Image (tube, grey):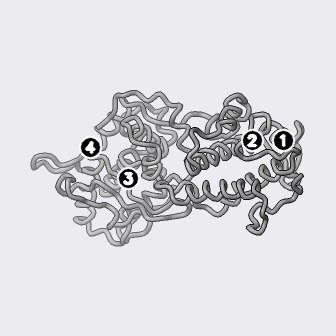
Amino acid sequence: MAPKNLDLFDDADPADQVRAYQEAFDQWLEHQRTAASRKITLASSIRSYTVLWQAFAEWCLSQSPVVGLDGITEADLGAFINSRLEPANAARAKPSRLKEAGKFTPRHAWRLLKLIDSVLEIRAEATGAAAPNRAAATLLQSREDWLYANANRRDALPDYLAPAEARILVNYLSAGLPRSGRRGADITWQELRNRSAVALHLGSGLTPADVRMLRLTSPVMRTGDEKGVPGTVHVPAHGDSPEREAPVIKWAGRVLAYWLQVRKEQKLAGDFLFPATRTGKPWGKVTHYDAVKAVLEASGIDKSLVEGGAYRLRHTFALRQLRRGKSPDLVAKWLGVVEMRVMDRYRRVDYSSERPD
């Protein structure tokens, strides 16, 4: 029997089974780091998954007989998880104590099974196996308490605008644009800024923080774009969000182009695309939130849809792109999503085929 406290990541250990678990995890981790959507990049996330995998592998290697990586069954997985699940009265215990004891919550079970399924899938590709071992996925589907333990899956579906409501908002945001020699709507530069920001929430899927980070150089015009209309926006890295480029839907690009024109005419200072003042001060969180809310209220959409603000619009963009056949990996890249499980909740939404242009 293998010792119970194996150092799985010690290259000096010659055991074939130990090496198999180590190599499989390393292959999976490399895939996460190099995938187009950069699925996992945060050190804290990597550490979390490493600890989970090491605990599982140590248990498998301590069994008699040893549980080989390629022969893992639902029974093996269930036995390990049940041995680590916290007691029923754990809600009263201090989280730090549970962590020290190495106990699992149902959410740990969900995360571990998703991890194992993903590791075995990458391993199957690397070894040329006909099909990956789906024991983890099968077990997860059979245990609703684990399957829906992750808040992002069980809690309310993402807030979004139905196509009819989205069209109302698009028409409102586009109504003030100049057309055929006619001047644009007689509104203040602040109001136009607010509408342009909302256009990027809905037409590019940007978060509030993304919008406030944009610079004058962020809008990008490429060959094939409508003349003078940005078809892409460059989003700088900030916080946990990676640097990226996101597409700008045409109607939103026209709103943005008009804002750039007015911003120049008004001689607004500073490098921020959406400044708070004429002197170029950055836009604050609260004033930005209030601005989005005011635009939504004035647009004519149902008042119940105002709550959720910019994120409701971001989710609408994501659903629209997925419905049009864009891959989850690509949409995640546009959104700046680094944890692909965040995309899972969109799959549960039945979004109508009617879409705003």
Q: Which mark is residue 85?
A: 1
Q: CA distance from mark 3 to mark 4?
A: 13 Å
Residue assigned mark 4: 174
Residue farthest toward the left in the current orientation of the protein: 181
**Of helix, strand and loop, which one carries label 1?**
loop
Q: Tell which circle, 3 or 4, labels the residue nearer the N-terminal end.
A: 4
Crowd band around label 3 with a 10 angstrom C-alpha radius: few (<14), some (14–19), many (20+): many
Q: Tell which circle, 1 or 3, labels the residue nearer the N-terminal end.
A: 1
Q: Residue at x 42, y 60 (%)?
A: 244
For discs 3 and 2, the disc positioned in front in the rendered view:
2
**Of helix, strand and loop, which one carries label 3?**
helix
Residue assigned mark 3: 197
Crowd band around label 4 with a 10 angstrom C-alpha radius: few (<14), some (14–19), many (20+): some
Q: CA distance from mark 1 to mark 2?
A: 8 Å
Q: CA distance from mark 3 to mark 2?
A: 40 Å
**Of helix, strand and loop, which one carries label 4?**
helix
Q: Residue at x 76, y 67 (%)?
A: 10
* Position in image of residue 166 (x %, y %): 37, 35
Q: Quadrant of residue 29?
A: bottom right
* Position in image of residue 74 (x %, y %): 75, 34
Specify the amino acid type for callout 4: Ser
Residue assigned mark 2: 109
Q: Tell which circle, 1 or 2, labels the residue nearer the N-terminal end.
A: 1
Crowd band around label 1 with a 10 angstrom C-alpha radius: few (<14), some (14–19), many (20+): some
Specify the amino acid type for callout 3: Ala
Give the left or right position of residue 92, taking residue 119 as reference: right
Crowd band around label 2 with a 10 angstrom C-alpha radius: few (<14), some (14–19), many (20+): many
* Position in image of residue 324 (x %, y %): 36, 36
Q: Quadrant of residue 64?
A: top right
For discs 1 and 4, the disc positioned in front in the rendered view:
1
